[in-house]
Amino acid sequence: MGVDRPLSDVKVLDLSRVLAGPYCSMMLGDMGADVIKVERPGSGDDTRQWGPPEAGGEAAYYLCVNRNKRSIAVDLKKEEGREIIRRLALRSDILIENFKVGTLSKMGLGYEDLKPLNPRLIYCSITGFGQNGPYKDKPGYDFMIQGMGGVMSITGDPEGPPMKVGVAIVDITAGLFACNAILAALRHRDKTGRGQYIDIALLDAVVAWLANVGSNYLVSGEVPPRYGNAHPNIVPYEPFQTKDGTYIALAVGNDRQWQAFCRLAGLEHLTHDPRFATNPQRVVHRGELIPLVAQAMRQKTADEWLEELDRLKIPCGPINTLDRVFSDPQVRAREMVAEVAHPTAGSVKLVASPMKFSDTPCGIDRHPPLLGEHTDEVLRRELGCSDQEIARLRERGVAA
């Protein structure tokens, strides 16, 4: 290690699993926090079994969100295991958990239980529906909450079925909101000396990032349709097929760009047509306009369009498959892939952090840990357990 990172003095106790919580704690770990990941003995985080593909016996899904952590395997069903968590919470700045509402409180590990022991503790719960409301006891998973939160109703072909986003976007954004909230709570604690409780819900997250589409409904009262790959408020702003059969993304964001595009595409007469002269009118008359643009786009190859559109500063881009994404010169220049030594796989490639700091850079100091890889280390160094005490905990199945 040895590199100064933004959160190098912060300790995180991570009782979460799967995606939203681990994504949050990974970001904190990338910024230098010491993250202790607590897992079930024997099976560990559910995502360890979510393969193939795998590397060195570890599922790629698990690898993607668990770097920069130390793993301990502790049985929370046993009182001795719960006592280990209490002792670690005494030494932690942040606790992250995504158990069902009330589960940790029944174990004596809820916020109200730990707050008297460590008033500086920032305790973040991530659940499907939050700590209150009629759905608080319902299980919540990304796919179903994409549906409940409205995003599937606005995603997909207008004539086709509702469609989910291709990644677990609700989990990811809930993890981002959780990380933002934790950083704000750390700032508040710097001023007051007091920790606090943070309640993050997956449903809240998706409703929050409906953004302009949600605002469109709140302002107009009109339920938005699905636009496929088109934009509800900007036209033309969607993929178009080119002469060689390849699709490119064309994003004409303002009237100046529209006029430049029309000159390039041989559609200059459309700039004088009142139906298409301004973006609001293009939105109203998209059904008449898009076939005209599509016909023009089929007159040149993708490479020809991309070169000429770039020259005119009209936003555009190829629609890349992932092999092209990770070989893209810009992605490579931004160092968005990192290769990390791993005890069973030899090495693994991971997507790097997008956060670029000038003075305290993020980094990957620890590979995604094996299950219980650091149990002995944490018990010995953090809690002062002797080898004999650790051996007894293992014999009783408390730790592994």
Image (cartoon, grey):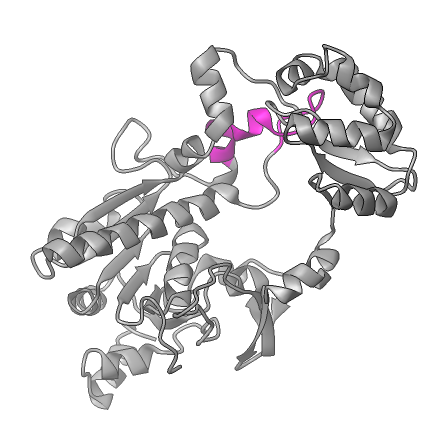
Q: Is residue 230 visible to the viewer in this orientation of the structure?
A: no
Between 386 and 11, the one lying in front of the other is: 11
Q: Where is residue 383 shown, x and y percent of the image?
A: 19, 78
Q: Residue at x 39, y 78 (%)?
A: 3
Residue 94 found in image quarter? bottom left
Q: Residue at x 56, y 29 (%)?
A: 152
Q: Where is residue 42 shown, x and y percent of the image?
A: 41, 69
Q: Residue at x 22, y 55 (%)?
A: 187
Residue 101 found in image quarter? top left
Position of residue 292 relative to residue 240, above or below, is: above
Between 381 and 322, the one lying in front of the other is: 322
Between 163 and 322, the one lying in front of the other is: 322
Q: Where is residue 172 shown, x and y percent of the image?
A: 47, 48
**Magenta stretch holds residue 252:** no
Position of residue 255 relative to residue 59, above or below, is: above
Q: Is residue 218 visible to the viewer in this orientation of the structure?
A: yes
Total marks in image = 0
In the shown orientation, is residue 217 left or right of residue 240?
Answer: left
Q: Where is residue 281 shown, x and y percent of the image?
A: 66, 13
**Magenta stretch holds residue 149:** yes
> Split into 4 quadrants, where in the image is the N terminus?
bottom left
Q: From this viewpoint, which residue is outermost toward the bottom?
A: 387
* Image: magenta residue range: 144-163
In the shown orientation, is residue 40 left or right of residue 198?
Answer: right
In the shown orientation, is residue 179 left or right of residue 91?
Answer: right
Position of residue 4 relative to residue 193, above or below, is: below
Position of residue 246 relative to residue 74, above or below, is: above
> Split into 4 quadrants, where in the image is the C terminus?
bottom left
Q: From this viewpoint, which residue is outermost toward the left?
A: 116
Q: Residue at x 77, y 31 (%)?
A: 261
